[in-house]
Image (cartoon, helix red, strand yellow):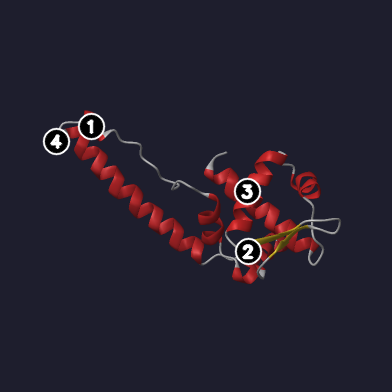
Amino acid sequence: MSASTKLSTSVKALCYLQQEHPKAVSSFELEEAIGINSSKLRRILSLLVKNGIVESNAGMSGGFKLKKLPSEIHLQEIYCAIEDRKAFHLDVRRNAIKKNSLPEKLNSYFLDLFSEVQVTIEDKMKNITLQSIINKIKSN
């Protein structure tokens, strides 16, 4: 699942959990509501639980709930919880490239550029809360 898909799926799940609050939502109900494959959804929910964004309770009345208020959950926090790679990842094989060659210089350039872009993206996401996303979609 690509970064943008995982992030948008996570936000959809979190918005649905907020919509159903205070009720605990089963993974099956969530899967039906947002239309995502159950194994992908469980993987995402597991990461969100592990990172303290969502809580999970077992049993008949169990399910998933937001662990924080939507105004306390930032998009950057969600992104960091579900992603093991950066949005701008450059796979470079340094051992096959001669030192000070054009390919090495280009790799270095793009690594620096992608690093700067990544910081900019994450800084912007720090200013976006789940609540602001919910408010935005309600107003449209």
| Mark toward the viewer: 4 or 1 | 1
Q: Which residue is mark 1?
A: 95
Dot 3 or dot 2: first in sequence order is 3
Badge 1 density bin: few <14, some 14–19, many ≥20, Cα 10 Å: few
Q: CA distance from mark 4 to mark 1?
A: 9 Å
Badge 3 density bin: few <14, some 14–19, many ≥20, Cα 10 Å: many
Q: CA distance from mark 2 to mark 4?
A: 46 Å
Q: Amino acid at mark 1?
A: Asn
Q: CA distance from mark 4 to mark 3?
A: 41 Å
**Is the C-beta separation of discs 3 and 2 under 8 Å?**
no
Residue at screen point 60% across, 71% down: 72
| Mark toward the viewer: 2 or 4 | 4
> SS at mark 3?
helix
Q: CA distance from mark 3 to mark 1?
A: 35 Å
Badge 4 density bin: few <14, some 14–19, many ≥20, Cα 10 Å: few
Dot 1 or dot 2: first in sequence order is 1
